[in-house]
Amino acid sequence: MSKLSRKLFWRMAIMICSVFLVSFLVNTYFLPKYMLYQKKVNLAELTATVQRTSTDELAKAEAELEQQYNVTIVSSEFESNLNDLNETIRRKLYAEGVSLSKFWLSEESIKELKQNKPVHKLYNQTKLNTSFLVTFLRVDDKLVLIGTSVAHSDQSLRAVNTFNLFIAVGALLFTLGLAWLIARQIIRHLKELAKNAEDISNLDFHKTELKTGDEIELLAASINQMSDKLKDAHLALEQKNDNLQSFISDISHEFKTPIALIKAYSSGIRDGLDDGTFLHVIDKKTDEMALLVDKLLHLAKLQNEPYQMADFNLLTLLEHALENYEVAIQHAGKMVEVDDRRLHQPIVRADQQKIGIVLDNFISNALKYSNEPRVRIELANEGERLLFTIRNSIRSWDEKDLKQIWQPYYVMESSRNKQLSGSGLGLSIVRAILEKHEAPYGTIAEAEEIQFYFSLPVRSG
């Protein structure tokens, strides 16, 4: 027997034994008293009825009352001789089928009856194993006896308790089998869930379909839900690890090239080969390395840095950002078009410095990756929000690019062409900023064009 079977058996056995014990105590100590009490209540009710009835009416209704209350009613004239009175009543009771081995009405009882007080007696008939509960009444000039038999309950109670004991033993045996069946059914399902949990711990994510209609089904549903979430988290973690490895490889290359150049030019200076440009090259490569490190530090800082929310003009901020790229735009032969025809309220509430970083990254990416001269930017009000959209043509794209483009270290252009590749940190910085603002954002790719967008709440009033 399993542990669960034993637990179920003992708990159910204790419950059955407790019920049997309570039943035994109630039957032994309270049931006789309760039965006698019910007889007394029944007799008292009938006594009150008889006291309101005349002797003539009583004679007519005697048979009906006896049947209704399950009692024996006899009556007799008061006689001066007490012995004769007792004998008369005894004979009448015998005629009614009541045989008493012990019966006596005393002088004190006669005095109380003459004062119209009811007299209550209980005659214990030991040999007959019964008692006779009697109420004497004076109705007009007659003595009326109302009596009912009270069986001694010892033997009956022993029989009842013995029968209950047999029932309890049978119930325990039945409980043993029932506990085994229930536990077997529960354990079978729990073993399935335990196996599923063990598989999940070994990164084997799958579901267990159980239809029990109880808490076990809810537990299975919870484990299935946990399995799905862990699977998604595991896949995301693997993807991040892959991106991280790619990033480490890329960033190592980014650092390795300037370090090699710095070392080469330093050696040239030491050997007297400097033509006047060596220090300039070393400064340039050092600045490139410092810029990359700054981006890494900036991405880490954005997670916890406090944001200063204020109202500002997004169109003005965009114009300043484009001014910074004016030379780069002319040098690359690009053209940036800004469409603000649907812009009625340019004032938004956000962290202006952080949104400036977002605009800078979007513009930089569009200029870097666009294979056509034109880059289009649109500002438009939609309800209580301002929507920013930037579009540019793209050489090629894959569905997986759109899913991972916002992840740190991911670069859409996997080649090492310096004009196209980057550190993969720009859009992850953008995502961190926009998520801090709780701003909707996303990417849409259609044909040979890619579109980035985000929206901010406009100033109310």
Image (cartoon, rainbow, N blue to C red):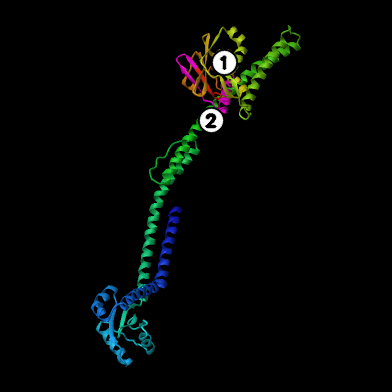
Mark identifier at residue 363: 1
Residue 356, picture quadrant: top right
Q: Position of residue 444 (x, y in %)?
A: 48, 19
Q: What x and y, as percent, mark residue 136? A: 34, 82
How far across and how far down the image is residue 125, in percent?
Answer: 34, 83
In the orientation shown, which residue stands out farthest toward the bottom?
81
Quadrant of residue 323 within the rendered picture: top right
Q: In the picture provided, is 40 more to the left or to the right than 75?
A: right
Q: Is residue 182 visible?
A: yes
**Vertical relation: 274 (above or below) 179:** above
Q: Which residue is mark 2?
A: 237
| Above or below 46: residue 362 | above
Quarter of the image with the N terminus in it: bottom left
Q: Amino acid at mark 2?
A: Leu
Q: Is residue 438 magenta?
A: yes
Quadrant in the picture for residue 46: bottom left
Badge 2 or badge 1: first in the primary sequence? 2
Secondary structure at numbered mark 1: helix
Taking 2 as reference, is 348 above or below it? above
Q: Nearer the viewer, residue 274 or 405?
A: 405
Residues rendered magenta in the picture: 423-450
Can residue 244 be seen in the rendering of this structure?
Answer: no
Q: What amino acid type should be assigned to the residue bearing mark 1?
A: Ile
Mark 1 Cα shell of 10 Å, populated few (<14), some (14-19), many (≥20):
many
